[in-house]
Amino acid sequence: MNFILESFNQATNLILNLDRELLQIIFLSLKVSGIALFTATVIGLPLGAFVGLKRFVGRGLLITTLNTFMGLPPVVVGLFLYLMLSRSGPLGFLSLLYTPTAMIIAQTILAFPIVAGLTNSAVVRVAPIIKLASRSLGATSFQTTVTVIKEARYGIMSAVIAALGRVMAEVGAILIVGGNIAGYTRVMTTTIAMETDKGDFELAMALGIVLLLISLIINFFMFLIQKKGVREAPQ
Amino acid sequence: MRVRLTVSNIYKYYNGIPLFENCSYTFDRSGVYVLMGPNGSGKSTFLRMCALLESPDRGKINYFENKRALPKDINLMRRITLLLPEVGVFNTTVFKNVAYGLKIRGFKNNKIKEKVEEVLQFVGLIHKKEQNALTLSTGEKKRMGIARALVLEPEVLFLDEPTASVDWKNTEIIENIIIQLKKRLNSIIIIATHDKESTKRVGDFLLYIREGKIYKEHPDKQIP
């Protein structure tokens, strides 16, 4: 019990003293996850809206695929990406393995199905009646699409926040393709895993506290968004 | 050019079951046409086809002269409006809901404000203009839906079950709005309803869907 309290105290000290290594790791984590989330949103939002709004051959298969990909095991993504990016792999010439870019790609692959799948659900929920109402009032196809997306905004925001939660907590894939190189590809989750392995708990615990705080903030925003959505749609 | 809606030899099937077969009708006089028929007879489908939101399997729908009306003809779509039974309320204020049609047509903000406030006054919802439209009662939502359509001054207005699931007080208000509308707009108003009493109060022409066709009935006829 003592060593837990001691580690906790040391971890708190690291946070309060704004330890350089700690800040560097947090900054890289936020950078990698932020870029991955942005990319996942740019790909996933239009894809989810398209699948939700349009009827086309293979739509059911695409939805099933997206739903399956929402639960992709990170280590499988890491393995697949490793094979693609390794020197003898088809994308080996890009020399991306063990770089932050590889980690961003891995997190994007994990996050975009969440954004697309949940955006699709949000759009499908509002689409039929809003689409019809919008069209009946003289909206063009583009104006109708914009209206439906606007009406599904709370569901879409929840989708983005859920994806952020996934990328922030991810460890398996980025460890495989990032390699946990100090000062270069070392992020919060991979550092926690490594430091715990080594038996050095203070940095692991400090990062754990930061990660928990970030998770708390994400969930708080999610709660606010959902609350706003429910308040505005009391039906 | 004076508006004229012609439905020519339309066929519509649902899962192989015919809903309309060789159905034709011409709406060529302004006034209120009331379309009646039992549940599942195709009243709503008929309105959606006329409003170009759904296509018939065969046959054609013309506005004005012989040109076939198509949903991609946005200029035509903007001269007709349908109020859906569920209205399709946008998650925003009553004002913004009513302003929607004007905004997508590129009206200036001051013109939008003037028109929306006038029409909200007309339907008795001006005091609720800043309220979220989703918090309105069913009757108020229908009135807001009418306002949303009315502000566009359509040449053909379709009202699908405007008084369904509405209390007597709101039914009376909606009927009065329609009666006022007849005087105000020189348009064709087509209402699909189950409400026989309402039909007598607001209708100029009574139509009945029977076996996939539309028949004109005398307004005093006892509808089954």
Image (cartoon, coloured by chain):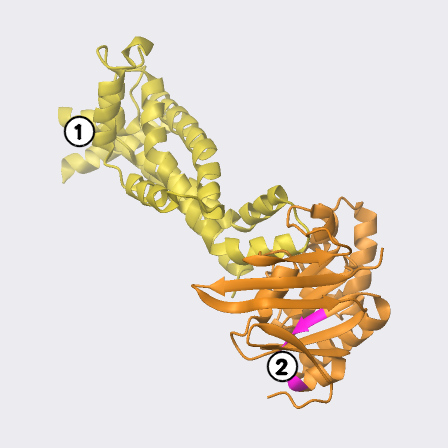
Chain colours: A yellow, B orange
Residue at (27%, 20%) from the top-left corner? A178
Q: Specify the amino acid type for callout 1.
A: Thr
The reply to whether label 2 and label 1 mark residues of one chain is no
Q: Which mark is residue B167?
A: 2
Q: Specify the amino acid type for callout 2.
A: Asp
Q: Position of residue B205 (x, y in %)?
A: 75, 78
Subunit of label 2: B
Q: Position of residue B216 (x, y in %)?
A: 70, 78
Region rendered in magenta: B190-196
Q: SS of the residue at dot 1?
A: helix
Residue at (83%, 55%) from the top-left corner? B114
A161 relative to B6 in the view: left or right: left
Q: Position of residue A42 (x, y in %)?
A: 47, 32
A14 relative to A157 in the view: left or right: left
- Please tell me how many numbered marks the rendered image carries: 2
**Quadrant where the image shows the N terminus of chain B:** bottom right
